[in-house]
Image (spheres, grey):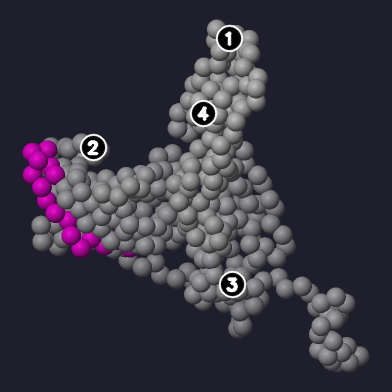
Amino acid sequence: MFRATTRFCLLMGALLSLAGCPGDDAPTCQDCTPGAATCEGNYTVICNGDGKGFRYNACGSAQYCLNGACQTRACSNLGGGSCVDTSTLTQCDNNGTAQTTVTCGASEVCAGGACVAAACTDGDVRCGDPYSVITCTGGAWTEEVCSGGQICGDDPSGAKACVAATCTANSARCDGNVSVVCDHTGATESRTTCGGNEVCDSGFCRTKICGEVLTTPDASADQTSTPDTTGDVPGPEPDIFRPPLEPNPVLKFTLNNVAKDYNLNVRADYITTEKTLKIQGARSGEKIEINLTQIEPRSLGMYTDTDSTEVVVQICYFDGINGDEVAPCAVGFSHASIGYTVDVTDNNGPGSRVKGTFSAVLKDINEQNVTIEAGEFDVKHF
């Protein structure tokens, strides 16, 4: 009976998707198409060459994701408006893909990037666009623009005020197998429980790749995938899991044609509160830091002192000799960059490798210059 049922299933393959057969289950995993690119939130998601995983790249606040690629935004105040005059404003959509002109009604005025009633009562306070607070003073609206990292919301008393954003706009994280995505302003997070054949990866639910198992992170960390030795992968399950050896970190360059190779505390860290990717290392008596500020997690790209991107790079170096510190580097550094080129080619979040190249011209407190050339880094992201 079992063989007959199986043969029937094979012959009636087109109908099985509707009727099913004993023991047949819906696919619980699938490989991705190598090189295929899609968008998740404001991240590009690209399938690896072997079809067994993905790399996520944040488009950042100056770009938005469309059809798997980062595009330059038409406007930056996402979901917000800007008054052109007392009766007209330009409205940015939630992704910054387009900016439209809005004319206020006959009994309205433009204040704080929004059309509001022209008549107001002294002391009235409300939000203009998501990033400003407007207050009625002397029968007219006045605007307070919120500082970076703030939006218009309710303070502890329930009054409208500039308050700290709840989350980082357009960011995503995993809380177990729950996708947690912050909206375009940083006001609210939405939570989506991933399905039975899905996993939460880098903040988003996706179909599980055959032959993988995701490590269980803490609620604030992104997930990373590792090979599975059971289920879809043939062969016996090993008795002991032996993780692959971590490659030796690389942080090296030439300084005025003298080779420098660093092997102490060589690592990369992303400091969320400062939106800074820090690459650092030391050797006997010397140390170096490469700080990329106003950079989104997992961002790739080439940054120079002449480009127009929002990312600012500061390379700080201590030569082990000169005790005089030079601004704007932190205490303990004798040289600061005055020109640079940094190319980040790999950066897929905690647990991955951050790779790239760099060069720079640095000065000390006496305005004496040194030159870094042929810089290279391949370090673990902690």
In this picture, which residue range is highlighted in magenta? 363-380
- Amino acid type of the residue that numbered disc 4 sits on in the rendered structure: Cys
**Foreground tag (3 vs 4):** 4
Query: Neighbour class for label 2 at 10 Å: few (<14), some, many (≥20)?
Result: few
Q: CA distance from mark 2 to mark 1?
A: 46 Å
Which residue is drawn at the image coordinates 14% and 49% (left, top)?
A: 319
What distance separates the C-alpha of mark 3 from that of mark 4? 46 Å
| Residue position for label 1 | 139
Q: Amino acid at mark 3?
A: Cys
Q: Is residue 320 above or below residue 55?
A: above
Q: Does the residue at mark 1 contact the one at mark 3 (Cβ under 8 Å)?
A: no
Q: Position of residue 231 (x, y in %)?
A: 66, 76
| Nearer to the camera, 241 or 158 | 158
Give the residue at mark 3.
32
Q: For the residue carrying disc 3, how many other residues have a C-alpha within 10 Å: few (<14), some (14-19), or many (20+)?
A: many
Q: Amino acid at mark 1?
A: Gly
Residue drawn at the location 72% of the way across and 62% of the way down: 196
Instruction: Residue 67: name its quadrant.
Output: bottom right
**Residue to which mark 4 is pinned:** 83
